[in-house]
């Protein structure tokens, strides 16, 4: 037999012997979970801040580890890498900001090519610090497990040179366990220059009544404007109410007619006119002895306060008040005794030398804003003094 035939026979014998040996299965036959993490966003995916400060933005997402496929009754493991984490039944991962790109400028205009921001740079570190992730460490999770992640985004308070739009990738990373990072959750961080804020309240005045009033219809006029300025929002509302010192009238709304529609432009003065009528200013009450005012049913004379309120478009509020009194139109007349004979025969009698005439007074309501009717008021007291 030739050497060639003997060599070929030896190869066949070796092959036959090898077919009887068992080839070890990877991870001892366990079901291996291959693939990346998967994600579902469950909250907001954008936060916008103007200048410094601003309220934190809350968000959330779910992350799930890959499961074995097919999944049999055998143990599920992650493939792992190297001797330490090979065929591991559980894994550990860190969750947080994994990538940062600047995608638009300070005005929101998209960049021609997104700029990668290194996580280790000062800019990257400031953005990473603005994202609080809970949990940030996900430990001892098995294939197919999932967890909910809560994200709180704060204003990183960057320098104005770094204002713009940033695309932030939040993801889980399990180094050494053979699990891919996956798509992660993309979050947009929008940073803009501070906007002007209207903090200046309107200017408001009560221009009528100008002084005390006679009982009747009391005319009211109020004026207001929102001072002009770069942040001015204009006058949004103008109102007035009246109260009496004694409390009989309490914050009664005065209906105003405005000469300019609201919201009025900054710097434009708006005038509101209206009126209110104290008790007895019109109508039959107090115009006869039967309907006379008494201590139990008083007329509208007394002291009043009008309060005007103005509000601008930013909610800044200003008020102004005007105090005034409402009285009757009181008139006194004197009739000379020497010409009427009222004191005739009396002035020469002992103790009558002071007799000189008669005195008469009347109380009426306004003859300009009402009908000037005589008022019957049993609460009025008259004192004649020398």
Image: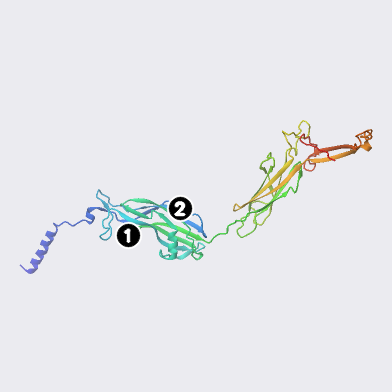
Q: CA distance from mark 2 to mark 1?
A: 28 Å
Query: Which colour scheme appears in the figure?
Result: rainbow
Which one is nearer the viewer's eye here, 331 or 203? 331
Q: Quadrant of residue 198?
A: bottom right
Quadrant of the rendered image containing residue 254: top right
Q: Residue at x 45, y 62 (%)?
A: 126
Which disc is residue 175 wearing? Answer: 1
Side (left or right) of 193 relative to 273: left
Depicted 364 relative to depicted 46: above or below = above
Instruction: Out of 314 and 125, give the one closest to the viewer.
Output: 125
- Residue 115 vertical position relative to residue 345 in the rendered view, above or below: below
- Would you say residue 133 is visible in this rendering? yes
**Is 287 placed above or below 171 here?**
above
The N terminus - image quarter:
bottom left
Q: Secondary structure at mark 2?
A: strand
Q: Which mark is residue 154?
A: none
Circle 2 is placed at which residue position? 58
């Amino acid at each position: 037999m030739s050497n060639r035939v003997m060599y070929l026979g030896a190869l066949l014998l070796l092959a036959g012997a090898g077919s009887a040996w068992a080839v070890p299965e990877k991870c001892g036959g366990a079901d291996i979970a291959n693939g990346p993490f998967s994600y579902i966003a469950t909250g907001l995916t954008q936060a916008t801040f103007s200048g410094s400060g601003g309220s934190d933005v809350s968000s959330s997402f779910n992350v799930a580890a890959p499961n074995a496929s097919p999944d049999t009754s055998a143990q599920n493991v992650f493939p792992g890498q190297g001797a330490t984490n090979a065929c591991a039944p559980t894994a550990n991962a860190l969750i947080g900001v994994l990538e940062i790109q600047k995608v638009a400028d300070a005005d929101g205009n998209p960049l021609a090519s997104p700029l990668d921001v290194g996580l280790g740079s000062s800019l990257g570190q400031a953005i990473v610090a603005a994202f609080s992730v809970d949990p940030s460490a996900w430990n001892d999770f098995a294939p197919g497990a999932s967890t909910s992640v809560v994200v709180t985004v704060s204003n990183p308070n960057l320098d104005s040179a770094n204002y713009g739009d940033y695309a932030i990738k939040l993801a889980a990373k399990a180094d050494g366990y053979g699990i891919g990072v996956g798509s992660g959750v993309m979050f947009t961080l929008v940073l803009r220059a501070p906007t002007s804020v209207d903090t200046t309240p309107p200017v408001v005045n009560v221009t009528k009544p100008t002084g005390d009033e006679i009982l009747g219809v009391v005319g009211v006029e109020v004026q207001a404007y929102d001072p002009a300025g770069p942040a001015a929002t204009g006058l949004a509302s103008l109102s007035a109410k009246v109260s009496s010192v004694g409390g009989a009238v309490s914050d009664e709304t005065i209906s105003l007619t405005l000469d300019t529609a609201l919201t009025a432009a900054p710097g434009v003065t708006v005038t509101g006119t209206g009126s209110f009528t104290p008790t007895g200013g019109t109508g039959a009450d107090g115009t006869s002895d039967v309907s006379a005012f008494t201590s139990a049913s008083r007329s509208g004379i007394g002291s009043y306060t009008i309060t005007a309120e103005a509000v601008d478009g930013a909610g800044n509020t200003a008020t102004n008040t005007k105090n005034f009194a409402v009285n009757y139109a009181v008139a006194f007349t004197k009739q000379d005794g020497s010409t009427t004979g009222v004191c005739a025969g009396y002035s020469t009698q002992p103790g009558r030398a002071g007799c000189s005439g008669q005195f008469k007074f009347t109380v009426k309501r306004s003859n300009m804003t009402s009908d000037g009717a005589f008022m019957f008021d049993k609460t009025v007291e008259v004192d004649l003094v020398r």
